[in-house]
Amino acid sequence: MQKPTLPLVFVSILLLASVLSTAQDSLRFKRDTTLRNDTSRRDTTRFRRGMNSLFADSSKLTSSDYQLRIEKTYDVLSMIRNQSDLGPGIAAIREKLADSDSSLFVLKDNIVNNSSALSLRNLQMFRTLLANIHEDIEHQRMVLDSAEAGLSGLRTEMKNLIADTVLRELWRDSANRQLFAAQLKDMREAWRTSTTKLKESIALINQLQTHNSGNAITTASLEEKVNNLLLNSFARVFGKEFNYLWEPTPDSSLNKLRSAYERAYTGERKALRYYFKDSVNTRLFLLLIGLLFGIWAYRNILRLKKANAVDILKGPQVDYLYPHYIASVFLAMFSLAPLFDLDAPSVYIESMQFLLILTLTFICWKKWPRKLFVYWIVMVFLYLCFSFTHHLLVPGVLQRSWLILLNVLSVIFGSLFLRGMKDHLHFRGFLRFVIILHNVMNVLAVVCNLFGRFSLAQILGSAAIFSFTQAIGLAVFSRVIIEAILLQIEASRIRQGVKNAFDYQAVLQAFKGPIAFLVFVLWLIVFTTNLNIYETSKEVFVFIMQKQRSVGSATFTIGGVLLFFLIIWVAHLLQKYVGYFFGDTGSEEIENKRQRSKMLIARLVVLCLGYLLAVAASGLPVDKITIVLGALGVGIGLGLQNIVSNFVSGIILIFDRPLQVGDAIEIGDKAGKVREIGLRSSTLLTTDGAEVIIPNGDILSTPITNWTLTNNQQRLALSLSVSGSNDIEKVNKLVTDTIISSGYVMENVAPQIEYISIKKEQFDLKVYFWCKDVFKASQARSAIIYLLHKQLAREDISIEA
């Protein structure tokens, strides 16, 4: 039973040996695998370190990187330092705010503490000045806000520099600080200067914004109070302010009024000083307009003198502009002053009017008759008296009686001036209306003064005399403008070689309408300003003009519609009279066809621009206009083809130029000289003096014979019958020499003689020659026939033509 155990033991030993061998192999494999993994990991780490060292730019910066960043930082600091300088604009705002403080203090003192002594005139002036201050405040707010936004951007740049990591790294590295010590010192100084300048500028802007905001609040409060006082003043003016003239007034009340009036006058004077300082640009622009007008007038006068046309300057059409052209420049400036500052206070208007009166007195010293000039001097004296009493008058019995005396004298001498002006002033109808109005207002002023309406009497009397003097000045101003236009026409005609006189009365009538409109507007501004109703009238007018109205779905304003037609009217006036400024009065003496063609193009451009500007400025809805144009297109297709055809044909004639103004043409059975080319029709002047109006469409659809398209030559033919000589050569020579000596033919082209028949002592011949001026063809034919008869008769040869 012992034998079977041996094989089992042997098998067990073999199994154990194989298991041990397998375990050893497994351990060896794990050690090899671990070794390979460690080697691979070390290789990967080494590769990554190499790549990092090759491509890294922030882990370790070089000295060139630091140098570049220092340069960029220094540039940024320089930019911040330079842009932190606020410039002269902010300095001007500081001065303006200081002036506003002074003016607001005076206005507030009068409006709050002295309101009972303020007249309607004072309140109107204060409201105007407050409106100007409010406008300045809004402008200053915009400038300060813009400056604050710029400084905020600079502060952001400064914060970005503080957060810069490269600069932080540079400050932490002692070696680099040592290396860039000089640059860092300069940058530190630039940093200190820039931050200080930036902080100062930000603090100043904040201070000015606070100051400006405070002025805005004060201005708004004062404007509201002035508006309330104005409402009460309008009612107070028409009420009984003082006792009747025959009732005594206590001295104590007069003393109080005197003190209050002096205080109000002081406030008005200080406020006016602010206005004059604030409106310098307006007066500079007015001065520029006057300078340009003076250069224009002097240039034309000098041109006429060089052309020995002094008789034109001394003629009846030039009364004021020569030799007083410098004074006329000031007259134009002072007359136009209200138009350049529509919101000016009445004191400014009065000062301009006083200068206008002085200039007018100087110009008219030797122009008007002696009596008329004496009446004018009296009216000037009354003007000064009204101005003085308007500012300083305290309504006692003597002062009120003095004012009544001034009113009576104004009526008397105003009537005398009206009777004596006759034909010595322009716009006599307008002046008659103003003088009658002046007399009526003075009578009303007397009545108001008697019954205690002193302020109303004061306003009526002053407005009356101011409107009178302003109207006289505007009448002379209109004449000066007309004379300047006449001199421009004369100078242009002389430059083109035209010396014939023209009907200047036609020019006066042409420009009378536009100049009369300008004169009336200027007078109305001054008149309403002196009545202290300009601002109110302006607000009512603007409200009516700008109020939105609707017809169906279309909205419009009356102002937009009126502006549309006004611009179109002005455009038509300009295109009609633009030729006058280049010497073209519509007569046929001017032969410069090129200039006339340019005038046609200029008229077309002015007209087109006028219509485009009218549509753009009126604010009319373009989509609605498109609908209207579409409807007009239907109408054109139905019945307006001829009008549109003529209009388009006119444009083609202007640009294609088959004929020009001044050409001698034949169209159908009509022949003559082209006098005018319009957009719808053209005018042909025949030799009989008739003006034939031909639609432009007919001109383009009919063959045109243009004798002067490229030159002014015309070939003429004479049929002659010569008798009394058999010598053909002699006849040829006599006929040729006579024709050449006439002066009407071209010198380089000899006449040609064609014999029709030859009989005994008689020749029938035809002579052809070139007349050098087609417009003198008939005159040339007549003169040559006369000369041939005269020359051949000396040789006992007779002719029949």
Image (cartoon, rainbow, N blue to C red):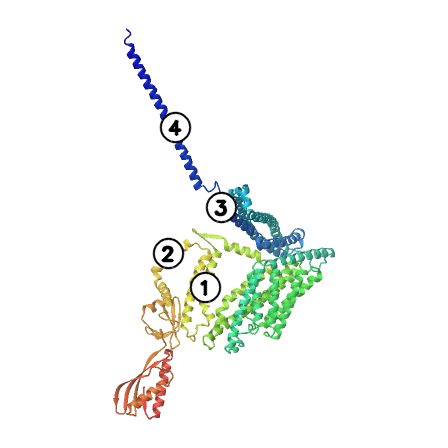
Q: Residue at x 35, y 85 (%)?
A: 739
Q: Nearer the viewer, mark 4 or mark 2?
A: 4
189, 479: nearer the viewer: 189
What whole-number distance in Å separates the C-alpha atoms at marks 1 and 2? 24 Å
Secondary element at image label 3: helix
Residue 571: which numbered mark, if any? 1
The residue pinned by badge 3 equals 65
What whole-number distance in Å separates the C-alpha atoms at marks 4 and 2? 94 Å
In x, y percent, where is residue 733? 32, 88
The residue pinned by badge 2 equals 630
**Quadrant of the image containing the N terminus:** top left
Q: Residue at x 28, y 12 (%)?
A: 7
Q: Amino acid at mark 1?
A: Ala
Query: Considering only order in the chain, which callout, 3 or 1, is on the residue closer to the N terminus?
Result: 3
Q: Amino acid at mark 3?
A: Asp
What whole-number distance in Å separates the C-alpha atoms at marks 2 and 3? 71 Å
**Left or right: 773 with respect to 236?**
left
Secondary element at image label 4: helix
What whole-number distance in Å separates the C-alpha atoms at marks 1 and 4? 101 Å
**Left or right: 355 with respect to 51?**
right
Q: Nearer the viewer, mark 2 or mark 3?
A: 3
**Quadrant of the image containing the C terminus:** bottom left
Secondary element at image label 1: helix
In x, y percent, where is residue 342? 56, 59
Residue 56 seen anywhere in this rendered image of the structure: yes
Query: Considering only order in the chain, which callout, 2 or 4, is on the residue closer to the N terminus?
Result: 4
Q: Residue at x 49, y 68 (%)?
A: 511
Secondary element at image label 2: helix
602, 509: nearer the viewer: 602
The residue pinned by badge 4 equals 34
Q: Amino acid at mark 2?
A: Gly
Cβ atoms at labels 1 and 3 below 8 Å apart: no
